[in-house]
Image (tube, rainbow, N blue to C red):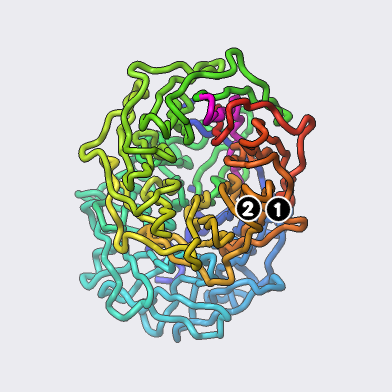
Amino acid sequence: MHFLSVVRRLGAVVLLCGAHSSFAQSYTVTAPGTLGGTISYGYSVNANGQVAGASSSTAGRALPLAAFLYSGGVMKKLGGGPGSNALGINASGTVVGFSFVKPNSPITHAFVTSAAGGPIDLGTLGGPLSVANAINANGQVVGSSTTGGLSAHAFLINAPYTPNSMKDLGTLGGPISVATAINASGQVVGSSLKKDFLTTHAFLISAPYTAGSMQDLGSLGGLVTVARGINTSGQVVGSSMPKGNQAIHAFLLNTAPLGAMTDLGTLGGSFSQANAINATGQIVGASYTAKNAASHAFIYQSSAQGGSGRMVDLNTLIPATSGWVLDSATSIADNGDITGYGTVNGQTQAFLLVPTVPVAKFVYVTEFDSNTVSMYSLGSNGQLAPLSPSTVTTGGAPVGIALSPSGKYAYVANTADGTVSMYSVGGNGVLTPLSPFAVPTGQTPVDIVVSPSGQYVYVANGDGTVSMYGAGGNGVLTQLNPSTVATGRGPTSIAVSPSGQYAYVTNSTDRTVSMYSVGSNGQLAPLSPFTVTTGGAPEGAPAGIAVSPSGQYAYVIINGDSVVSTYSVGGNGVLTPLDPSSTVAIVAHPDGIAVSPSGRYAYVLDVSDNTVSIYSVGGDGVLTPLNPSTVATGTSPFGIAVSPSGQYVYVASGGDNAVSMYSVNANTGMLTSLSPPTVPAPGTPRRIVFSQ
């Protein structure tokens, strides 16, 4: 059996396979085209919309294939041997794949692109053949290579990619293994033949990748399981035979801690496979439709992570007049961009799906001194206009405000009352109190957040607790049992990861961040370790936290130290400080932070200087100040928010009783004041949220 055939069987590469819902998102579809031939395949996409794949390059012919990079609307051939495929791309645009070394030869070598864009031969594990399947943000490359004889093993190689310096990751007992994906933490998944030469199981292996540490991930009950993707939270996807071995179904598996595989079902046929999963838990792949009539691309997201909890045909989420039939979705970026291949005008072509930009229609601002929420419509030009009525009553001294992901309900944390006020959101944007109107919290609630699924609500209280609630179908909150979990001393803010798996609380007195896992019942459970220390100076008090849209990084603003500290988020949810050089200084006293929906920019309020500091966010999570690095706000700014479209930024200025409004330069992240630059918010505004 040829090496590439073995690799395909174990799930590393699919080279030449031909193979209106409740899901709210819709997509535009773009055809990257070809290199001059008749076909193309998209295999991997990053959050910058860059696609790696393969295309024929001879007019009128489907073969041979050549690796390509599609970037900025242009498809570029990557070079290499007489035939090549690009199979993976990271956030920096570095591409991996394989290339035939000679014409009319079956020998392939793995490659990674250099800074100049050309391929670097990665060599092998000693045999003649190798394939690179994936690369993470740190430049670690994984794939499979022959070792000599009939063996082929999964490998990992680090930059600077010295030829033949691959690390053999071993097997689950058989002679063959293939590594298919690697996350930012260096966790590697793939598949391996077992000792019996009949059973193939998915595996997980983590640093330091010691011999014998490959973990068997099991199956859905049948003989063959293939892992194809892993995200930053350690969630693994792939395909597995259920008991009886008469079908193949896509699966989802949580590995932190290791749970049982979830069968994702199909689109009606007997086959499905999940190819990739992003940081927010969105899964893409391919499935046969009813009676196995056709292969269609699908997307899936569990209800616990804000999705429909069922497989949705991507063909139902693109314009009906597009002319496309999407056969297979092979990759999804953390921003939701999807690539794969389908049929258009009778030809197999790569596609790029881009989520339609959510349009926020309404904005809500808590007013601390007037015990109200101000309500606004959001115009297409970014301007806010007061609704009629323009305010709704809250409890005493409202600070935090959060909306359900559906946009149907709003919740306000009232500091003086120790309550959460609850509202329905009308079609005209007006908030109407629910009945009952409020539920109790701990003492002095300071912040509130809704889980991505909309099922749970968490309130950080000044008494050193988090109050936990379930959200009913009518929006009313009910305390969980137990109803609270301890934090550190002096909580100031709370955030939940985009995946919904972890929660974080900043504690000003302790100068720590408390870290929790989120159980299937919504309960928060302290991680181990429970806290990470922030701030170097005695007066360094963490004032707020934001988790990047990818879920890979967390940013903590530290008042007193006047810095923003960056942390990586491990697969187990634990925060680890990046290199000290990644901590950036802020003038005076930071008091609020927001990250753009694209994850490319971060904005930090300075309550003393009355400014917003602006940063670009690198692929490694590091913040770099723009030039100029600040823009003026009103006095005493307390709250900042970026619109869901990423086009506008709003700042609640308590000293001016106004909301400052800015447009965002999509290419640079710089802010420009709108005209007029402010809208009145007469009761000492504190926090800002959006509703569609």
**In screen coordinates, is 107 left or right of 443?**
right
Task: Provide residue 568's location: percent of width, then percent of height.
Answer: 47, 62
Q: Is residue 519 visible?
A: no
**Magenta run includes residue 350:** yes
What's drawn in magenta, residue-wise?
349-370
In the foreground, 165 or 677:
677
Alpha-carbon span between mark 2 and mark 1? 40 Å
**Magenta run includes residue 500:** no
Task: Provide residue 523's location: percent of width, then percent of height.
Answer: 27, 43
* Looking at the image, residue 662 lies above or below residue 109: above
In the foreground, 367 or 13:
367
Q: Residues within 10 Å of mark 1 (few under 14, many from 20)?
A: few
Quarter of the view holding residue 312: top left
Q: Give the residue displayed 31% in from the left and 81% down from the top.
A: 211
In the foreground, 561 or 218:
561
Q: Secondary structure at mark 2?
A: loop
Where does label 1 land, which residue? 60
Where does label 2 land, which residue? 600
Q: Secondary structure at mark 1?
A: loop
Residue type pointed to by label 1: Gly
Q: Give the residue displayed 61% in from the left and 30% down from the top.
A: 359
